[in-house]
């Protein structure tokens, strides 16, 4: 495959993103306009985030059982094109930053059939002790898991993306 | 109003039912067929059930805070006509039976604009101690609340329904 | 009521906002954390927007039947406090700007019981000819309806909010 | 593998069912009781049905593009055990009967971790000409697709189920 080909491939599937998980649009997720209802992209972001964390060695369920929840402090979506019933969507994800108590996750949703960017967006999170409202310090194993995962997946975008698309290591 | 008129009115709005709560169809609840997605009627049933219980003096939230949950053991829906975005729907509800640990609630959903029956159905419930799987005995105050509510609302269908529609006592 | 009281009242319910609609949290809208799932605030925003437009004389259903849809181009939510099952929420809404093809709506969601701000956010929209991807010019009657509604509701925040809370003119 | 082992395996995963598709429970699908909200099983049934039809050579999207919709006429769910966030669920499906205009699909949802039956249920459907309320005759290619699929998958339950579980032919 030529470099130009790689670059086109990379652009089609989330350059700079480190994880990809595929979902298929359910009828339940569409609305009377015939497209995915706008709130459901936040559900896709949740699925992408859970699978991203799992790939980084962090089972979200275990985090909760240890008495911690990752509360959302803000969410943002930019809508580019509508997705429709039965579309296969690639949910590209990366952790853009991680501090003492907060982290930020970014997303791009691409339609696989025509490699079109459907939406992009981000969510910001604070770790909370379960049942309380005060932020808790992100445990070292969580921070280390995310940092190592990001480092291992980043490189030249072509390499990363090529590995994702052919190996499917990060796909669900 | 003539008896015939009363009877027609009663048929249009849930003869034999003892409580009515109105909802308006949200865009989120429609699907690509342009109608309310079939699973969402179970959500309407939940709203109807919570408001029915509130009218009978039973705040569902208090029930939960007392360590009890009303688990659903079965649910059934018969779909007659499709409802659409922005339709105002009357959710008619009654408690059809109540035993030691189980109770059954029945529903009819009518569109207000043309008095058309949209769906009918029922849910069956068992009271559980929160976090456990074994049924718990329905507390006396819950049973008494439901029985008194049903007795107070039942009568000739015309009377009940007329009171509902004009007085709105049971409406949320 | 004193001016100080008015000011407190205004702060509690969306100063500068021009419309209020109340919803009650459904069980369906909560998640395993015991709070409203984060995506569902976008559904509340939709309900608030539809009722805002209706109060401004614009039935969204008629807009659609005329072959136009108000596509969302971006959405943003800042989460302050969690809301729970059965909470009554005030959805405060205003149109922050309206151009030739785009408009922006802002929201605050307050819990009525303790007058706590739950979330704030906005959505941005472009009018599209139904089935097409190209923006359409906002019809004059839509722009006029929104501008007149905003002008009629704006004034000193205290006055507006007081009228809202006691008269309920804008409540659904 | 012994016959006894096969039988246990078959019982654990939907004896007599002809198709299996796996989903993982999303946080969005849970409720404040910490379990999957009861209406969401109808969404799982939809996902199961669409994948069943795809395996039988019937793309639901094509059916719709040909001007036909498979309207639900009734739905039923029996709830046995609660499922929780992140559970992997096997959605077992079969077409129980198919007439001139109606067909019935049956489902069992099993949790993979402990091979526990979570819910069972069915949906009944009538084919409608899109936008009309009158049933349409099921096209021959649809009936033939379903009948051939059922015939090819049915046999001794042990054989069918074993093939499903090891080969994953029917899994999404």
Image (cartoon, coloured by chain):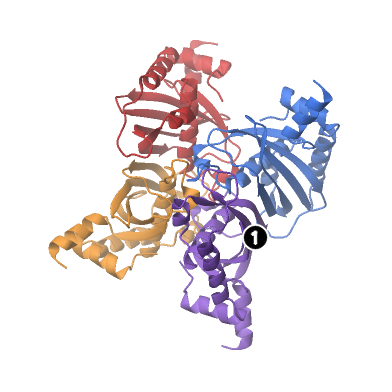
Chain colours: A orange, B blue, C red, D purple
Please identify the residue farthest to the bottom as the structure is shown: D2
Horizontal side, residue D116 vs residue B95: left or right: left
Residue A96 place in picture, x, y as percent = 28, 51
The percent position of residue A130, horizontal first and vertical second, equals: 51, 50
**Quadrant, the N terminus of chain A:** bottom left
Name the residue: 80% across, 41% down. B141
Q: Mark 1 lies on which chain?
A: D
Q: Where is residue D157 in the image (x, y as percent from the top left)?
A: 61, 79
Instruction: Work out whether residue C91 or residue D53 is closer to the camera in this orientation and state it.
Output: D53
Label 1 Cα crowd, 10 Å radius (few <14 / some 14-19 / many 20+): many
Q: In which quarter of the image is the C terminus of chain A?
A: bottom left
Q: Which of D35 and B120 is in front in this view?
A: B120
Whether B104 is drawn above or below C152: the answer is: below
Left or right placement of residue B61 versus residue B154 in this view: left
Residue D117 visible to an observer of this rendering: yes
Q: Position of residue B67 (x, y in %)?
A: 69, 49
Q: Please give the name of the residue rendered at 58% of the width and 39% of the height, measured from the top-left corner.
A: B83
On screen, C9 above or below D172?
Answer: above
Q: Locate residue D133: give its quadrant.
A: top right
> Does dot 1 land on a helix, a strand or a loop?
strand
Locate residue B21: give its quadrant: top right
Residue D5 figure quarter: bottom right
Image vertical order of residue B49 relative to residue D80, above or below? above
- Which residue corresponds to mark 1? D121
Q: Indicate left or right for B12 with A28 as reference.
A: right
Is residue C12 something that shows in the picture?
Answer: no
Total marks shown come to: 1
């Amino acid at each position: 495959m030529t470099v130009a080909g790689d670059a086109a491939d990379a652009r089609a599937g989330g350059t700079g993103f480190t994880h990809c998980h595929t979902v298929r649009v359910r009828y339940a997720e569409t609305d009377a306009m015939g497209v995915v209802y706008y709130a459901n992209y936040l559900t896709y972001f949740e699925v992408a985030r859970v699978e991203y964390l799992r790939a980084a060695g962090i089972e979200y369920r275990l985090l909760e059982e240890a008495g911690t929840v990752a509360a959302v402090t803000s969410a943002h979506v930019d809508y580019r094109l509508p997705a429709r019933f039965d579309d296969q969507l690639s949910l590209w994800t990366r952790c853009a930053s991680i501090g003492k108590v907060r982290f930020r996750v970014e997303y791009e949703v691409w339609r696989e059939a025509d490699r079109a960017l459907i939406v992009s967006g981000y969510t910001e999170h604070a770790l909370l002790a379960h049942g309380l409202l005060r932020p808790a310090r992100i445990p070292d194993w969580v921070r280390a898991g995310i940092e190592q995962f990001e480092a291992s997946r980043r490189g030249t975008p072509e390499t990363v993306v090529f590995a994702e698309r052919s190996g499917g290591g990060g796909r669900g």
